Image (cartoon, helix red, strand yellow):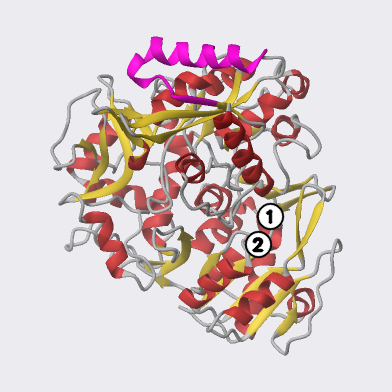
Amino acid sequence: MRYEEAYRQSIQDPDAFWLDAAQALDWDTSPPQGLGEDGSSWFAGGHLNLCHNAVDRHVEAGRGDDAALIYESPVTGTSQTYSFAELQSEIARTAGMLAAEGAKTGDRVIIYMPMIPQAVFAMLACARLGLVHSVVFGGFSAAELAKRIDDCEPVIVLTASCGIEGSKVIPYKPIVDDALNQASAKVSAVIVWQREQCAADLTSPCDKHWQAELAKAEPADCVSLPSDHPLYILYTSGTTGKPKGVVRETAGYGVALAWSMPNIYGVKPGEAYWAASDIGWVVGHSYIVYGPLLNGNATVLFEGKPVGTPNAGIFWRLVAKHQVSILFTAPTAIRAIRGADPAGELLAEAQPDCLRALFLAGERADPDTVEWVGEQLGKPVIDHWWQTELGWPALATCAGLGTAPAPVGSAGYPVPGFAFHVLDESGVAVGADVTGNLAIAEPLPPGSFRSLWQNEEGFRGYFTAFDGFYATGDAGVMGSDGAYRVMGRTDDIINVAGHRLSTGQIEEVVASCPSVVECAVIGGSDNLKGEVPVVFFVGASGAGDEAAVTGEIVGSVREQISPIAAPRDVVSVAALPKTRSGKILRNLLRAVVNGGEIVIPQTIENPDVVQATIDRFETFKKG
């Protein structure tokens, strides 16, 4: 079934389309219907277990010796591959350990761990028993961890003695202890995987030594679960300061991911697939853990950085070493690699010829970055777009359905199941090439969230802005070719003297300047025009003096967009403030420019950069 036919059927007859897709999974009780009578639920009446589908069924099919989990940790010098049979054994014993602590179906378990195999074992062990896991990014502060403990009220916290950031060892147990002291909710056990780089003190009566508990645990079997059983809670930032717990249901998520692997990414069972992300984010849930294993792929778990562990060739060397077919990472990673290896010498040395395509997501992929890595690889570079709430790609090039890569600068075409519309502020559809609010008509396809944990009002808020639509919160434009460009959050649309401009579009132009390595454009307050563009940029090595680069940037924006879009301020910085997942902190930059409150999030990658940015902007304004 090619893309056009698949998309047509998914919109016109979603019940039949997704029931057919559901046949890719093993069911204990097959669902009698796809789309429920309520118009939003999926596969009611079905029973299955996602851990069985991700691991056990491959062993039963005779693939027990095939590679399932490839662990590469350049920060510890570790490389290890687990077969499906070995993975099954580890998961079953981990599940037995949790069951021995009294955890039962429906209980919540928080996983606060680094990128080590035990974190994957823990996630799938929870799925095996019907426990609801909530993975918290290893590195969040005690205060942020405490919020999540209070919200989901876990019975167990699973952690490790430490994480490793580059050359720095981060003890985790003190953070967990602090969080538990701050939280009102109490847990029955804190189980700690002891790493040789740092031993944790187990002093509380509820503290348990993971290795010791595992050694005496009996393997546990899979539990058959109803389709709507919650698989996990994944917290995403909220506007009120309280995290929003996105709830993912078991069957819909499994069906969507199983469909996406061959149809979007074009990977076959037995191939190696690598999502260079973190299990603390939705990409890690969907495409490090569940998606590849459901499809019978070997999945790469990477503990390191794209540069510095040890150098900018690590991605390409591991792709070649493990014959990775598809690599998925964030544009920030590619920009960092380009900055460290601008001529692509390390890439050429690694010879990652096995790679069929590179997929990008997580932030806007500027055309300059896409074109650079495409030229270096000689392979398709495919941007795609989705959100934590949606759980899997909503805009993409469906490589497995024979779709040619979408034009550079776009996020792709609607994935089957997602009915996209671009709406004005009144909810009226706008025409092609007109920027508006990106919205998706109900019902959302399987895999999308159907609730927020204990926050029904917050969940309904996604559907109140435009009747009958899920409001993505992003601005977008559909081109005449049917491809969509996502221009950034709707608050990244600025109004310059009555003209609505996308800061994302301006960023594309700035990033295309040869003297610019990376940039961010935000709206600065202006007494005359209301708002004006302000550019922060990181200059390329040997780019020349700042005045010349500023002239290059302003001239490019005037020529390629409009004199109206010409930036008021162009500020050179050594680095841009980012989260650990690589997203530029535009709200923070906006506060720096407009004199707002500087709020430094717990997810920040480079806190020292914030003060340097403030100091640089103040120096710039003084002249």
x then y, percent, for residue 289:
57, 53
What predominant SS class does the magenta segment belong to? helix
Q: Residue at x 60, y 41 (%)?
A: 614
Observer able to see residue 410:
no
Magenta residue check for 561 = yes
Q: Amino acid at mark 2?
A: Ala
Q: Nearer the viewer, residue 360 or 555?
A: 555
Q: Secondary structure at mark 2?
A: helix
Q: Residue at x 60, y 59 (%)?
A: 137
Q: Nearer the viewer, residue 456 or 81?
A: 456
Q: Secondary structure at mark 1?
A: loop
Left or right position of 320 against 426: right
Residue 197 is marked as none
Q: Residue at x 46, y 65 (%)?
A: 233
Mark 2 neighbour class, 10 Å CA radius: few under 14, some 14 to 19, many 20 or more = many
| Residue ranking furthest to the front | 622
- Distance CA(mark 2)–CA(mark 1): 7 Å
Locate the N terminus and report the quarter of the image it occupies: top left
Residue 115 is marked as 1
x then y, percent, for residue 270:
60, 41
Mark 1 neighbour class, 10 Å CA radius: few under 14, some 14 to 19, many 20 or more = many
Please report the bounds of the magenta region as a residue range: 544-570
Q: Amino acid at mark 1?
A: Met
**Above or below 329: residue 18:** below
x then y, percent, for residue 118:
69, 63
Magenta residue check for 191 = no
Quadrant location of residue 351? top right
Q: Which residue is mark 2?
A: 119
Report if the CB atoms under discs 2 and 1 are less than 8 Å apart: yes
Q: Residue at x 79, y 33 (%)?
A: 311
